[in-house]
Each structure stands twice: as structure tokens, then as C-alpha cells.
Amino acid sequence: MYKVLIVDDERIIREGIGNSIDWDNYGFSLCGMAENGIDAYETIIRDVPDVVITDIKMPGMDGLELISKVNAEYPQIIFIILSGYGEFEFANKAMKYGVKYYLLKPCDENEIIMILIEIESEKKDEEKKDRFLKDINDNLKKVLPQVGEQFLRDFIMGVNYSKLELEYFLRLFDIKETKFKLIVFKMDNAVNESDVIDKFALKNIAYDILDQSTVYLSTILDNNILLLIKSMDLAILTDLLTQIKDAFNKYFKNDICVGVSNENSFDSINKMYLEVQECLKCEFYLGDNKIITEKVIEFNKSRDNLNDSTYNEIIAVSVKTGNIESLNLQLDSFFHMIYEGKLEIEMAKNYCIEIFLIILRQGDGKEVRGYTKGLYEIQDKSTLKQISVYIKEIANEIAKKNYDNNTENYGSIISTVINCVDNNIQNYELSLTWIAKTVLFINENYLGKLFYKHTNEKFSRYVVRLRMEKAKELIKSKKDYKIYEITEQIGLGDNTQYFSQVFKKYTGYTPSEYRKL
């Protein structure tokens, strides 16, 4: 059983989630509920749950602070964020802590259940992979030149060796050259240790093509395979690296990008590594499967030449109305703008995440939940092209569904608005904005135009008419309602003066005159 903690400052939400799910049925147990981050943190220290379902905005310690604090101490705990409409900034920050489950309020228990099922599956896969990797690592230790790998890794990370130690290791690895080059193979999509086989396959292919006498040391660092080789002519080396890429791509799906340092001495390995890392950043705009021998792009730190809202509304309308031709045209233009701007990678990804969220908001609420993990996917992509393909694919899916459903859904949307008004006529917050954001999750202006098109009446006028008709009924009833009682029941709070003005304009009489009639 995996333990779950629910954190929300609204009791109705906490208890609603806690009581609506049969936790045992999905392999989970509810270990507690907390109304703020402080209480939640105390429970986490005591019980160490596997999953925490938390709101973002809470008094005391908010959800983001809780995630940051817990992530530092218990990185294995999985967070599911519950958030209100439009909290992109919070969601984006949460992504940096590895949070990939993000639900927009209101959500039902089925959305949470689907995530729980996915988490349980991931947990079991991780446990299976851990067992598998342990067996693999036990065997690899017997055959890998561990000393050489660690020696190169130490130099990459800037560890200092004494002169005597350095001379000893150079003799140990039979290194007699004085000039070297560092090659870094960056594997795209190699996001977890289950791709360890691909990494070792690439390493073996590189050794075969470059020849054992050319490669002195090698190691694997994150998603990178590093080879320290003796210096050679760049044209010859480029041809050999192309052969390595072609051989690897023939049998494996992972794309690779190759960076090559300038020639340098052994004690400058760390400098060579940093140099190659700068080269590899260019992959974001150049595209994957490239050999990069120098930094050919200077990244732009300024956003001044970009207008944040240039494409947002047009793309949103294109998705909502299912205009796929316009959508693709605008998305191509948007990504071209990012490409031409050559923004720093993190800034460019933030732009892409922002447009992705705008696209998601145009889809059906339940279906959109399945796409929200795309926020994590975008952060993980290596190139702008990969991001554009991913976003365009999902945008087209949502737009096509909207196109297919628009004709029948227009009437359904208006019916929902009318029912919402009928059921919330006493609600002081009732407005087009409130319905658009909390009920239908669509653009307010779009909803207003759609309502007028189907009813030939502005929404505000419609609500006033219903409220005044209800007021007339209350005045004519046998109960002798006070004016303030009437205003409360029709959603105008204690604004009796405003009610009297509107009522007279609507009926031609003041409330007291109407009562006498």
C-alpha cells in the first residue's frame, strides 16, 4: 500500500477527495489530511507518505514552499498539484522540483484516480527497474574499467590531483600524448537509467570505429558519453563521428548530438568539458543529430523584441473554433519568432509552456488532464523542433475535437450557462467571468459572443431580467419580505439602493409601489 496525504485549506475539498475515493481499491491508503503546509510538513516528517495531493495557495506555508522543502528532504515523494485557473507561474516553478501532475480546479475523483493508477504503475516499474539495474550494475562492476572512468570524471568535475598522482595515473593508462580532444555524445530522450543499454551500446560503437588506440579514457555523465582521445585532424574526426552516429541510429531510436572541444593539454580537461557544453547548447536551435565543433549561436538574454501576447489570442481562438489551418500557421509563426530571437533556452521553453497552457485551456476539462504532463515533457525536450512538433501535435488533436464537437456543443454550452444562472441567481459573484473561469474554462469574450448569438440577449441583461423577475415573485408572495431580504435572495447582497434603481428601471415602479399594486 502506498500512503497518501491530502493538503488543502478548504475543508470541503479535503474531505470531498478523502471520502470520494476507495483508496484500498487502487493500492493506496489515506494517512491524513492537513489544512495548510505547516501541518502537512509535520505529518510528512512523521508518516513519510508516498503521494501528497496539495493546493498551491494556502495560508502559513503555501504548496510551492511545501514542495520545495519536502523535495530537499524526501525527493521520492510524488506531488499532485491542485490549482486554480491561470496559476501558470506557480505550475512552472513546481515543474523545476520534478512535479508532473497538475490538476485544474474543480476536478472530480476520476481525474485523481487516473493519476493514482499511473503513479502506482510507475512505482512498480521503478521497483522492477531498481532490481534490474542492481543486477546490471553488479555485473558491470566486473567488466568496466572503473578506475579510468572515475579518473576522467574527477577531472571533468574539477578534482585536483597532485603531480605525483597525475604521473602515476598517466602511466597506469599508458597515456603518452600531450595534446587531446574531448568528445561528448549527448543522448536525447535518455531521461532515466533504463536507457543504460543504449549508452553502453553507443560507447562500444565509438570504441570500435575510433579504434582502441585512439581513445584513452571514457565515462558516462548523466546523458553524456565522454571520450578523451588523442588529437587528430578535424575533418578526419568529423568523418569518424558521422560513422558512429549512422551506426548507432541504425539500431537505436535515441538521437544523439556530438560536441567536440578544441585541442588542449590533459590538465585542461575541465576547461574542454565546459567548452563542449557551450557548443551543445546550440543544439536547441540547430536541431538534434548534429556534430558541433564550435559555439555558433550567441543566446539572447533580452525579451524586448518579443511581444508576449502577439499570438496568444489568435492561437486560442483557432484551437477553440477548430480552425486547424489558422492554428498551424500561427504556431509556425510563433516558433519562427522564438528561433529568430535566439533566446536563452530556459526563457524560450517558458514561452513554449505558456502557449501550451493556453492551448490546453481550449480543450475539454477531463481530456486536458491527460495532456498536463506535457509541461514536464516540454522541459525535457532538447531542441526547439522537438518542442514545436510536440505542441503542434497536441494542439491539432484538441482543435480537431473542438471542430467535431462545436456544432452540437454550442447549444450545450448555452444550456450550461442558463442552468448555472438559474442555480446561482442568489450568488453575489454570478457573472460571465465567473462562469467562464470556474464552470466552463473558456474565454470570457468568446462565451459572451456565443451567448448573444444564441439568445439575442446580452448576458448581463439576461441576469438582470431573471433577478428582477424573481424579485417580483418575492414581492408578490404572501411573505412580507424586507427589501434587504429580497436583495440577498437575488444575489445583490445588501445593495438595496442599487436594487431599487434597477427594479424601477425594469418595472417602472419602486419596490414599495409595486407591492401596493
Image (cartoon, rainbow, N blue to C red):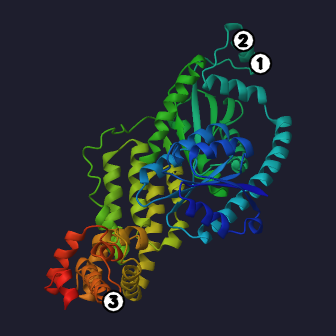
**Which of 191/86 is in front?**
86
Mark before the other along the chain sequence, 2 or 3: 2
Where residue 170 appears, as percent x and y from the top left, is 71, 17
- In front: mark 2 or mark 1? 2
Closer to the N terminus: mark 3 or mark 1? 1
Q: Residues within 10 Å of mark 3 (few under 14, many from 20)?
A: few
Task: Say which residue label 2 marks.
Answer: 165
Q: Which amino acid does the dot numbered 1 rest on?
A: Leu
**Which class describes the residues within 10 Å of circle 2: few (<14), some (14-19), or many (20+)?**
few
Q: Is disc 3 placed on a helix, strand or loop? A: loop
* Residue labelled with disc 3: 477
Measuring from the top left, give residue 226's x and y in whole percent: 63, 34
Q: Which residue lies furthest to the bottom in this view?
A: 517
Q: In the figure, is residue 248 to the left or right of 82?
A: right
- Give the residue at mark 1: 172
Which one is in front in this view, the residue at disc 3 or the one at disc 1?
Answer: 3
Between 314 and 470, the one lying in front of the other is: 470
Q: Is residue 325 visible?
A: yes
The x, y position of residue 47, in whole percent, is 74, 46
Q: Residue 149 carries which label?
A: none
Q: In which quarter of the image is the C terminus?
A: bottom left
Q: Which amino acid does label 2 sit on?
A: Glu
